[in-house]
Structure formats: structure tokens, C-alpha cells
Image (cartoon, rainbow, N blue to C red):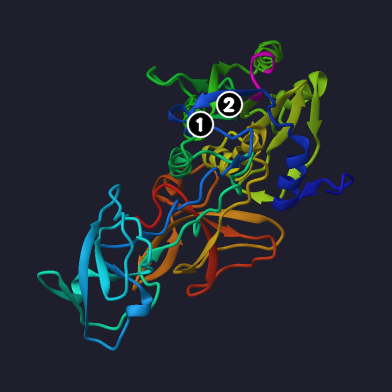
Amino acid sequence: MNQNSKTFSYEETLNFLSDYIKPISEVSQIGIDMALNRVLAEDILNTLDIPRFDNSAMDGWTLSSSDIQQVPFTLKEVGKAFAGHPYEGEVHRGECVRIMTGGKIPNGADTVVMREVVSQKADEITFLKEVKPGQNVRRQGEDIKKDSTCLARGTLLTAPKINLLATLGIASVKVFRKPKVAFFSTGDELQPIGSPLEEGHIYDSNRYCISAMLKEGGFDTLDLGVVMDDPKQLETTLLKAAKEADAVITSGGVSVGDADFMRELIKTHGDLLDFKCRIKPGSPLAFGKIGRCAYFGLPGNPTAAQVTYYAVVSRALKMLSGQGLQKIHLTSATCLDRLKKRPGYTDFQRGILAFENSEPVVRSAGSQKTGGLTSMIRSNCFIFLPETQDSVEPGDRVFVSPFFGACS
């Protein structure tokens, strides 16, 4: 990142934050039943081959490939192999063994034929369709080899990864402590929900949204409420947040207006990064530190606050949790609407992703104004328009980043 510049691209901002944010170092050992959404603090070495042994991918009969002939051909059934109950003998020439899905392939056999393509008369099994050597067999270690690293330090533990740990017989793992994130809203115009609105006031909605987004990300939270546009109150709350949390998020008060005090407070008590990220919506967006506590100042406009959280802040918090830099996951779709865009900034437009005629398509979710809520409510993806992108015409391919049940 060019430190003499005043603005940075989206990619430059994330790369800079990956160096600027210092991950939490505290580690604890916990059972895997409590490990969902925790971040691994160690590499997990595979102690077993997965699968542990050659096994059948379906119900049928297993035989030696040396017995394969031009169909139809007949072999003698000499036993059964069920999951957990292997056939103890060896399969010889002219023999086959009845096998169920997951059953261990017996010695002497290497091929499985599904039950739907054979005929049975007593212990005589006739194979009616072409048989290919090795078909329908899951080989030992074909998924994961013993002594390989199957999960790396910094991995977020999701349900499938916990399934893998259990498959390996691992009962507990070392994980990083969950980040604690404090947050508060600023502004004399904000009122608590449930009270009659006064003239010129609005309800404090962003704080509830920030709380929900943090919990959605699996972070511990500290809600410090609404703070008026008073430098002393703001200072007291900010220092409390910095003392008790690993990161603090504020909403509003980070612009350059007469009542926007947060930037000067961060400069006074810590470090404020004096740059802007070239994303839309998302300006102003402030970054800094107070001691060891990371600071993120979100815009006050509801949609801008949500977009900047998902696009930038959530990724910075993942860095804090030990996950490292998480690039945005993109796919492509045909755009059905015209989207206005000028080169020079990365635009996160709200869209509706769906499938039509078995192809992914996306349309605008409505108004893209930063203060509007409707487009965020209706959308299930961001339409990701990079800096070099100009306006989009119907039929153009665009990048999309799905969320909230996209394509459901």
C-alpha cells in the first residue's frame, strides 16, 4: 500500500489490514462438541487413512476383476460383507460376495457390481451388464492420506470440519479465544426503539444491526448503547470499549462535520489511519487502534454501514480471530438489468441471484442509495463491480458474492 496516497483500492485495503491487524494469541483446548465457529490454533494431522480400508460405494456383489468376462457371466456367492461385519475369508476364482454400502472389500476382490444389474438364483449370481475393473470401490486413503495435514491452523471450524475431526477420533482441539467486539452508536438524533419519536429524531437501528452481524459472525459482543455527540461522553465510552474488548465498532460520527468527534478522539488516544477505501457505498469508513484494540468507524447510513461491515470489517475481524486474510468469494451470473457505474471505485450493489433455465442470473434489488433499506432486505447477494468496471448492460456477465440463502 502506498502510504503517501489518500485513497486505496478495496484489495489494497484488505492487504494492508492483514498486516495491521494483530491476531489474538490466547489459546484453549475445547471439546469438538463446543468447537463450532471457533478457529484452530494448531495444524491437525490425519492419524488415519480416510477411508480406512477399501469399501463398497453401493449395495451389490464384490468380485475379482480377473473373473470379469463378456456378459452375461455367472459366479457363485460364498458369503456376505456388511458394514461393521466383514467377510473373513478370501474371494477365489469363480466366487463373489454379497456386499452392502460401506462394507469392507474382502481379500481377493477389487470390484463391486450394483444389485440392479444382476440376477440371482440361489447362490448363482449372473452379471448382466458390462463390468469395469475396480468400479464402485472407495479406495483406502483416497480422500485423506495418513500423516497429512487435513486442517490447517487458522481454519474456521464448520459442521463438515467437525465431522472430519470426529471421523478421525479427535475429541478435543486447540482454538484461539473468540474476539470480543464492543460497539456503540453516536448521535443526538438517535432514540431508543420503543419510545415515541421526537421531531427530527430517528430510531437507533444500526446498533441492533451491528449486534446481529457480529453474532452472525460468531463474535462475543459488548453493547455500549447510544452516546450523544458530546466529546467527554464519547471519550469515556471509547476508552471503556478499548479496555474491555479486542475491537470496537462505532456507527456515525466518523465524517468531517462539526459534530463528528470520533476521528479526533482516536487520534488523541491511539492511531487513526488517514486514508479512504475506494468502495461504494462505504465512505466515510475509519480504521485505527487504541492500544491493542482495533477500531472501525462505520458510516451512519444504514445500507452503507452494512455493506462496509460485510465487505471490509467482517474480514478484518476474521484476521483478528486468527483466520488470516479471507478473500471475497465470487461467482458469475448474467445480469438482467442495467446498472449504473463509473470506473474508479469498487461497487457493492445489492442484487437478487436466482436460476433461470438452469443458468445463474442476477437482477438489481432496487435503489442503491446509501440510506435505503429496501435493497438490503430484498437482496441475497452483492453484485461485485471492480474499479475498472463501467456501467453494466442487460445480458452482461458480472461477479456476484452470494449471502442470505442465495439461489434457494
Q: Where does the image place residue 333, in percent across and percent down from the top left?
A: 48, 67
Horizontal placement of 5 versus 345: left or right? Answer: right
Q: Residue 57: within the magenta?
A: no
The extreme left residue here reads 122
Figure label count? 2
Q: Quadrant of residue 102?
A: bottom left
* Residue to which mark 2 is pinned: 178
Label annotation for residue 341: none
In 3D space, how far apart are the residues under numbered discs 2 and 1 (Cα atoms)?
A: 8 Å
Tell me if mark 1 has few (under 14), some (14-19) or many (20+) residues whose alpha carbon lies within 10 angstroms of its own.
Answer: some
Q: Position of residue 281 (x, y in %)?
A: 60, 47
Q: Residue 49 appears at what percent x and percent y?
A: 50, 51
Q: Quadrant of residue 300?
A: top right
Pick whichever, 217 or 389, lies toward us. Answer: 217
- At 59% across and 35% down in the image, what residue appears? 40
Q: Along the polypeptide, which appears first: circle 2 or circle 1? A: 2
Q: Which amino acid type is marked by label 2?
A: Lys
Q: Secondary structure at mark 1?
A: loop
Q: Is residue 343 above or below residue 22?
A: below
Q: Position of residue 214 (x, y in %)?
A: 52, 31
Number of the label disc, if any, that sits on residue 218: 1
The magenta region covers 242-247
Which secondary structure, mark 2? loop
Answer whether residue 181 is visible to the viewer in this image.
Answer: no
Do labels 2 and 1 touch, CB within 8 Å? yes
